[in-house]
Image (tube, rainbow, N blue to C red):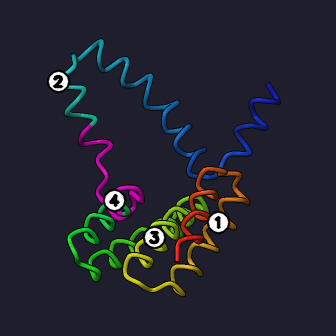
Amino acid sequence: MWERFRRFSALERPAQALFLRAVVVLPLVALSLRWCGFRATQSSLKLLLSDSHPEHNQSLVSKDAALAARLGSEDQAREHCAKALRAAEHRASPREVALTELTLGELEQGWRRPDAARTLLETARTRFQELHMAWHAAESERLLQIR
């Protein structure tokens, strides 16, 4: 039992919150499915779990930034990255900060700003190494090798 508690305590705050939310919501969903049926449960969950602040969904914001960059809108891409960074800082998630820095560093390379890209990618690589995210650290390193 102590081992499970230790592993839970080692999680980042957002992961702990997500786990506790699942512990509460999943049994309620099971009961709702049994008593109310699929459609009623589905509509209730949409209302209950909707994300009213899309800027707090880091992965979605990073995807929006990449799409805006592909469409040639540097200003929109920067705005999406700024939202992603604010959301990551709000959540106190070094993982999300590093992922956003990686995305922004890659975008800066595409915009032909090697100095800004290098700074972001080096910072992201360091964070990924601290978080033991080997694939992302290697990806940061690969992007740093591109001139």
Q: Position of residue 118 (x, y in %)?
A: 57, 79
Identify the residue at the far front of this view.
147
Residue highlighted by disc 4: 63
Q: Which picture quadrant has residue 107?
A: bottom left
Residue highlighted by disc 3: 106
Left or right? Give the position of 63 relative to 139: left
Residue highlighted by disc 2: 39
Residue at figure coordinates x 62%, y 64% from the top left:
141
The kind of secondary structure element at disc 1 is helix
Residue highlighted by disc 1: 125
Measured in 3D between alpha carbons, the distance from the residue under mark 3 to the one under mark 2, in whole angstroms, is 42 Å
Measured in 3D between alpha carbons, the distance from the residue under mark 3 to the one under mark 1, in whole angstroms, is 12 Å
Left or right? Give the position of 36 relative to 18: left
Give the mark nearer the N terminus: 2 vs 4.
Answer: 2
Q: Amino acid at mark 3?
A: Glu
- Determine contact: label 2, label 1, CB under 8 Å: no
Give the mark nearer the N terminus: 3 vs 2.
Answer: 2
Q: Which residues are magenta?
A: 46-61
Measured in 3D between alpha carbons, the distance from the residue under mark 2 to the one under mark 4, in whole angstroms, is 30 Å
Q: Amino acid at mark 1?
A: Arg
User: Mark 2 Cα within 10 Å, few/some/many (few <14, many 20+)?
Assistant: few
